[in-house]
């Protein structure tokens, strides 16, 4: 199966890869100079990741800490820039360490160029990572 290139389709594909815990394939969707930003990140969490390698390192251990089951309430909005979408969704699952429920609300602004993610501004809920076992970044607070 070829990777979709339209922003909305590529984003849906990226969610499927996260549910499949295929982080290398998810990272492969990124441009080499892609940038991920987390404007609401709490202290101790990165607010900006530059480059595919940095993004890969950030996501490497995600499935060991957060077991995603679904992305309900997914809404993808087109913008005046055909390469940019605004996404509203929830990510639900469980925290691997404790078995506690995981339920995160996201709003993301995603730009795709030449079939790869170049910019991902993720306005996720910082309160959801305050519970033990949610920190997959390896940082200590």
Image (cartoon, grey):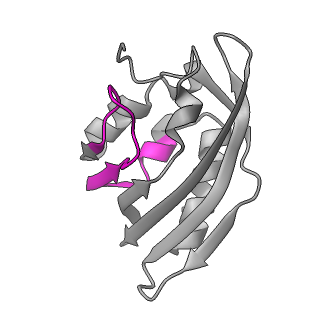
- Quick check: 117 left or right of 94? left
Q: Quadrant of the C terminus?
A: top left
Residue 52 higher or lower than 97, as above or below: below
Considering only vertical position in the picture, is 135 above or below 118? above
State yes or no: residue 36 in magenta. yes
Q: Is residue 17 above or below residue 81?
A: above
Residue 139 figure quarter: top left
Q: Position of residue 73 (x, y in %)?
A: 75, 58
- Residue 77 location, x and y as percent? 59, 76
Please state the total of marks drawn on the protein image. Answer: 0
Instruction: Give me the residue at 64% from left, 10% from top.
Output: 97
Percent position of residue 1, x then y: 63, 59
Q: Nearer the viewer, residue 39 or 99?
A: 39
Residues rendered magenta in the picture: 25-48
Q: For the view shown, which residue lies furthest in the bottom direction?
A: 80
Q: Nearer the viewer, residue 112 or 91?
A: 91
Q: Residue at x 62, y 50 (%)?
A: 15
Q: Mark yes or no: residue 6 visible.
A: yes
């Amino acid at each position: 199966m070829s990777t979709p290139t339209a922003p909305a389709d590529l984003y849906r594909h990226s969610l499927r890869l996260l549910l499949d815990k295929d982080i290398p394939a998810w990272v492969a969707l990124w441009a080499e100079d892609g940038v991920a930003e987390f404007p609401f990140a709490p202290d101790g969490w990165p607010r900006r990741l530059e480059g595919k390698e940095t993004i890969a390192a950030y996501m490497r251990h995600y499935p060991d800490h957060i077991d995603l089951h679904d992305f309900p309430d997914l809404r993808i909005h087109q913008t005046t820039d055909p390469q940019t979408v605004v996404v509203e969704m929830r990510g639900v699952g469980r925290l691997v360490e404790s078995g506690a429920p995981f339920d995160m609300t996201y709003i993301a602004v995603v730009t795709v160029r030449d079939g790869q993610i170049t910019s991902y501004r993720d306005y996720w809920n910082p309160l959801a990572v305050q519970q033990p076992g949610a920190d997959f970044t390896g940082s200590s607070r």
